[in-house]
Amino acid sequence: MNQAKVRYLVEEALAENETLFLIDLSISVNNKINVVVDGDEGVPLSECIRISRNVEHNLDREAEDFSLEVSTPDISKPIKLKRQYIKNIQRILKATTIADEEIEGILTDVTDENIVLVWSAREPKLEGKGKMTVEKTATIKYKDIKEAKVKIVF
């Protein structure tokens, strides 16, 4: 299976809707094509079907048998692209750094180089007994992020 041709067909279909973007494309040894797409405002089922049809109708099953799956990212999977971070601003994010530090907070900003997480923490008062709530901020460079996932709160 020609991965470049499949990628071209997926990107051709994505070009029709600029809010959609490719997260992952893989082709297994037994020609199972797996396409994962996301969108700035989510991905309707009709868009997955449209992308699937664009790929399927332009490949020849007589030449090579294949299976095709077009899906959206699993919520349990880590974020891979800057565009996914932007989509999740104001959501709770759990980031693990390459130094194995875990930081959980509200994603408040996304730049070309990093993300910003904000959270509240209880710390001892500077004077006297007891604790006070303080707002903490962490700026994390993309290159320092080992894994980042959106935390679902019910």
Image: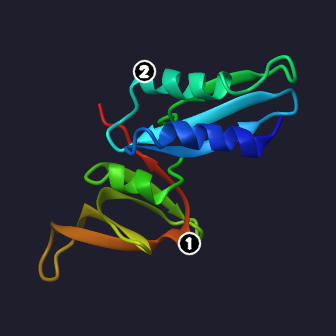
Label 2 belongs to which residue? 46
Q: Comparing marks 1 and 2, which lies closer to the viewer?
A: 2
Q: Quadrant of the N terminus?
A: top right
Q: Position of residue 17 (x, y in %)?
A: 40, 39
Q: Amino acid at mark 1?
A: Lys
Q: Quadrant of the C terminus?
A: top left
Q: Position of residue 6 (x, y in %)?
A: 70, 38
Query: Who's the residue at 64% across and 24% down the image?
Result: 69
Left or right of 29? Residue 66 is left
Label 1 belongs to which residue? 143
Q: Who is closer to the viewer here, 10 or 147?
A: 10
Q: CA distance from mark 1 to mark 2?
A: 35 Å
Q: Amino acid at mark 2?
A: Ser
Mark 2 Cα-neighbour bin, 10 Å: few <14, some 14–19, many ≥20: few
Compared with 80, 103 (above or below) is below
Q: Position of residue 87 (x, y in %)?
A: 34, 49
